[in-house]
Image (cartoon, rainbow, N blue to C red):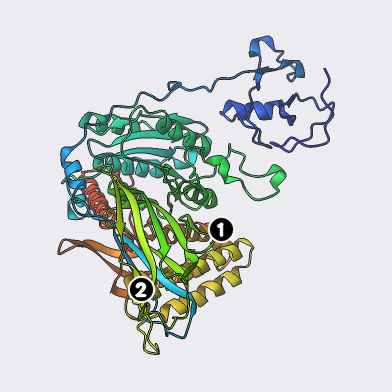
Amino acid sequence: MEGTKQTNPCAICLGGMGAGGGQAIFTAECSHTFHFHCISASVEHGNLLCPLCNAQWRELPFVRPPASMPTSQPPSVDAVQPRRVRAHSEDPVVFDDDEQVGPPDSRRQAGAASDEAVVVKTHGHYSAVARDSSDDNFAVLVHLKAPGIAGSGTEAAGDAPAQRAPVDLVTVLDVSRSMHGSKLALLKQAMRFVIDILGPDDRLSVVSFSSRARRVTRLTRMSDAGKALCVRAVESLTARTGTNIAEGLRTAAKVLDERRYRNGVSSVVLLTDGQDNYTPTRQAFGRGLPNYAALVPPSFARTGTSTGDRATPVHTFGFGNDHDAAAMHAVSEATGGTFSFIENEAVIQDAFAQCVGGLLSVVVQEARIAVQCLDPGVRIGSVKSGLYESSVDEDGRAALIVVGELYADEERRFLLFLVVPRAEATDGDLTALIKVSCLYRDAAAGADVNVMAEDMVVARPEHAVDAERSVEVERERVRVEATEDMAAARAAAERGEHQEAVEILESRRGAVAQSDAARGGDPMIVALEIELRDMRRRVSSRQNYARSGRAYMLAGMSAHMQQRGCSSQLQLPSVIAFQDGAVTTTAATHQVSQQAATLPYATPAMLAMLLRSRRAREASAAGAQRQPGAPEGAQGSEPTVPKELN
C-alpha cells in the first residue's frame, strides 16, 4: 500500500508527508493526517485528542508487536491498525476509593450558628448632591467583610484547632526532569509542612505528573496514619521526563469528580516550573492565540452563571523563570483560583502555607450581592467587579455580583456607578439610592444566610459645595484604576511596546503616590505604589519581561482583580509577627523604610500560617546546622534565603 499523497506537513514534526517518503501515515477519523511514529508517540503518553481540531478519537493508532515486524526496514502502512485503547494506569478505573469523611463536629456546627455574619456596608462618594443638580457617575462602594473564626489568628500559627469547614485538597505536583535536585527537595519539604497543618477531618490526595500523571495517594483523611502515609508517598517522588500539565489536572478532576464522600470545601493546588509539551494549546502551525482552555477539565471550569454552583478553584504556582505564566494564569482565572509567581525557590513552603492558610479558613460559600434601586429616577450605570461575574438589568434598576467563597475576615469591595437625578420640589431632603443584600451559605453549618445593609441615601441640600468626600471610595478608585493600568501595560508589553508599558505604569505610580490615601499612609496604597515601581522595571525590556515581568504582572493582576492574596507579594514585608494578638508586618523595601504595610489582601489566617511556615523553616535550618559533619548543600539542608524574605 503506497503512502497517501499529502501537500501539508505533519502537524507534529512539520516534516513532509509526500509519497515515497518511506514513513507510515496515519489518517484519523477526523480526516487529519500525521506521521505514524509522531502520533503514536503522542497517544502513548495519553493524548487522545486530535492536535489540530481537538476532536475526541475513538480509534487510535496501534503498532503490532516488534516480533512480527521486520527489523531491517521501516514499518509499512500495513502495520498501522486502528484499535480502541484503554488509558494505561496503575490506578483503579474509577477513583471511588476515597476515605470516608469524619462525623459532623457538634462544636463546629454550634460555632457556625453564632450571631456572627457577613458585614455589608455602603459608602457614597459624596455625602450630598445639590438639589438642582444631577450626577451621571455617582460612585458607591459596596463593602463585604466575612466573619472570623476561632483559630484564624494566633491559634492558626500554633496547634489550637480551628472551628471550620473541613477541606478536600488535591495537590498536583510537577516532577519533570527540571525539578530534580534542590527544587524537588524543597517541594517535598513544603508538602511535609502542608500535611502537618491539615486537620484530622481534612482529606488530601497527591497527584504527580511528568510525561504522564499518577495519583500517588487516594483522598485520605489526615489522621496520624493518613499523614504518615502521605509523607512516605511524597518522599517517594522522583523526577522524570516530560511535562503534561493537562493530564495532571485531569487526574485531579477525576479524584474529585468520582469521590464517594465530600467535605464542605474542595480545592486544587498546582505547581510547575515548566510548560506543557503534550497538550496542543497552540493553533495549527502557530496561527492564532493559544487555546489554554484545553488545559482545564470541564468540571473545574466556572459555569458563568449566577446560580451559585460551586466550581473547584485551582490555585496555580509558577516556579522559576521557565514556566508558562500565561497558561497558569488562564487556568486559575477559568476556575476561580489565584496565580502566584514563585521567583525564589526558597519560599515554596511559604507560598503553599499562605494559600492553604486561606483554604483552611473558608467561612462563606456561594455569596451573591443583590443591588436594587430605590428612588424611581436612580439607575445603575456600571459595576467594577474585577474577575467576579456581575450583571445589570436592562432598565438599570437592579444588579447582581457573584462573589463565591470568602476566607475568615476576608474583604471584598465593589464600585457601582449610579445615575442620580435632580431632586423634585416634592422630594424631601434625602434621596434613597440603593438597597444592598448578600445571600450566602455558611460553610461550616451549610445553612443559607441573608444579610442586608442600611439603605444608601444621599443628602439633597440647595448647595453642596462643602460635601464630604468618602475616603473609602477614593481608596477603591485608586486601586481599581491602578489594576486597569496594569492590564493596559501588560497588553503593551505583549505587543513589544515596552516603553509604552513603562510610561503607563510610571504615570499610574505617580497618580497613586499623589493620592490622599498614599499621603495618609494607607498600607494597601503604599504597597501598591511599590508594586507599580517593581512592575515598571520588569517590563522595561523584552528580556526583563520574558524573564520575570510577564509572570509578575499576571500574578499581580490575579491578586488585585480577585482581591485575594497571592504569594508573589511575599517579598513586600521584611518582618512578620504577632502584636497584641494580631498579625503585623513591616516593609523595608525600596524607599519605604520601616513603614507599616500589609501583604495586600492577606487575611489573619493566611498571615498566621505564613508565620508558622517561617518558624518551621528557621527551626529546620537551625537543626541542619547543628548536625555534626553535615556537608554544605547536603540533601535536606535549606538554601540561603535572602534577608528581605525572612
Residue 623's x, y, as percent? 21, 46
10 Å neighbourhood of mark 2: few (<14), some, or many (≥20)? some
Q: Please tell me how many numbered marks the rendered image carries.
A: 2
Q: Is residue 639 visible?
A: no
Q: Is residue 308 visible?
A: yes
Q: Quadrant of residue 98?
A: top left
Q: Is residue 584 above or below residue 51?
A: below
Which circle, 1 or 2, is nearer the viewer?
A: 2
Residue 286's x, y, as percent? 69, 47
Residue 176's x, y, as percent? 48, 38
Decide which of 528, 350 is in the foreground and name it: 528
Residue 275's x, y, as percent? 54, 44
Name the residue rendered at 77%, 37% in the picture.
9
What kind of element bears circle 2? strand
Q: Could you tell whether 564 is left or right of 3 in the image? A: left
Query: What residue would you read off at disc 2?
Result: 457
Q: Are marks 1 and 2 in contact (CB under 8 Å)?
A: no
Under mark 2, the amino acid is Val
Q: Could you tell whether 26 is left or right of 522 in the image? A: right
Query: What residue would you read off at disc 1?
Result: 546
